[in-house]
Image (cartoon, rainbow, N blue to C red):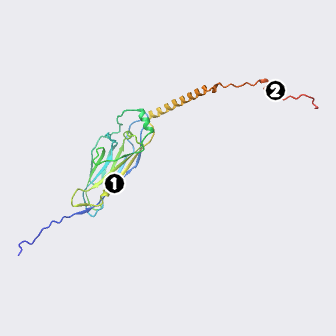
């Protein structure tokens, strides 16, 4: 007779979840650049608004969901912030980021008018901006969205402003920013993540330089054009003078002969 007929078995239990992330930006492009003499340095009046959505599309709850947003925010090796963070709102949980003072002032740089002229005539077409993992030159925003039941959705809104004078530090005629948002659950060996590629959303923001030269470049181009024009005129005049263009001899026509040729006289009787 068995004294103990009970057996306890540990059955590992795993469950599947699925997180979908997507986003958009408004406006999708903006124009930047300064060229006016002594123009005040300001940030862009039009805000750049990002919106990201995270949806729990799986059959089970996604535990302790996080959203990481990475935005290129500097030209290496410099650390001047290209964007100022104005506001972050989320419908679920909280968002965190390293705050820094709002700055609309241009960075100090060595003024070189010849370099500005060369840059104006030879701007590269486009520069791609993106973030590496744990990139210190990027604006990193972390949002803790908590447990997300199946069918639940969270929305994160981000409002930025750009600094045109800092964007103009790069010589490209256009800047394309790749913004990456990644949703992920808390790491747990019992959780199986389905369609992990859907957890990452890419949003593209493009800044286009207005291609107008700086004031001093405009003055230099006009000055050089005038000097070249006057020099060519003087050179052409000198060449014509050397070949005798201004010393041509004109044979005079006698006035008496000219008068005789201009009139016709007939002598004789009227009756003839």
- Give SS at disc 1: strand
Disc 2 versus disc 1: distance between alpha carbons? 100 Å
Determine whether, in the image, residue 231 is placed left or right of residue 3.
right
Determine the residue located farthest toward the right in the rendered image.
271
Q: Position of residue 221 (x, y in %)?
A: 48, 33
Say which mark, if any, is on residue 260: 2
Between 81 and 221, which is closer to the camera in this rendering? 221
Quadrant for the N terminus in the image = bottom left
Q: Position of residue 2 (x, y in %)?
A: 6, 74
Determine the residue located farthest toward the bottom in the rendered image.
1
- Residue at position x 29%, y 55% in the image: 183
Pointer 2 local density, CA inside 10 Å: few below 14, some 14–19, many at least 20: few
Q: Quadrant of residue 103?
A: top left
Q: Position of residue 269 (x, y in %)?
A: 93, 29
Q: Is residue 16 visible?
A: yes
Say which mark, if any, is on residue 121: none
- Give SS at disc 2: helix
Pointer 1 local density, CA inside 10 Å: few below 14, some 14–19, many at least 20: many
Count the marks: how many?
2
Quadrant for the C terminus in the image = top right
Q: Measured along the vertical axis of the image, is residue 191 above or below residue 206?
A: below
For mark 1, what is the residue?
201
């Amino acid at each position: 007779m068995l004294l103990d007929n009970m057996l306890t078995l540990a059955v590992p239990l795993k469950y599947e979840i699925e997180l979908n992330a997507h986003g958009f930006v408004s406006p999708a492009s903006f124009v930047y650049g300064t060229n006016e003499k002594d123009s005040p340095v300001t940030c862009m009046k039009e805000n750049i608004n990002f919106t990201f959505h995270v949806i729990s599309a799986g059959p089970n709850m996604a535990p302790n969901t996080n959203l990481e947003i990475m935005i290129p925010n500097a030209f290496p090796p410099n650390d001047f912030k290209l964007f100022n963070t104005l506001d972050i709102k989320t419908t679920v949980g909280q968002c965190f980021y390293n705050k820094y003072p709002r700055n609309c002032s241009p960075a100090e740089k060595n003024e070189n008018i010849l370099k500005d002229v060369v840059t104006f005539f030879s701007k590269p077409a486009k520069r791609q901006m993106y973030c590496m993992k744990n990139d210190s030159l990027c604006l990193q925003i972390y949002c803790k969205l908590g447990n997300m039941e199946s069918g639940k959705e969270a929305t994160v809104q981000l409002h930025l402003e750009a600094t045109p004078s800092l964007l103009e530090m790069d010589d490209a005629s256009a800047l394309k920013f790749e913004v990456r948002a990644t949703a992920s659950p808390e790491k747990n060996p019992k959780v199986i993540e389905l369609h992990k590629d859907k957890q990452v959303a890419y949003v593209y923001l493009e800044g286009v330089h207005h291609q107008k030269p700086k004031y001093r470049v405009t003055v230099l181009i006009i000055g050089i054009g005038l000097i070249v024009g006057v020099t060519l005129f003087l050179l052409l005049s000198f060449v014509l003078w050397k070949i005798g263009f201004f010393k041509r001899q004109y044979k005079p026509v006698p006035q008496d002969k000219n008068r005789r040729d201009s009139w016709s006289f007939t002598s004789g009787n009227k009756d003839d």
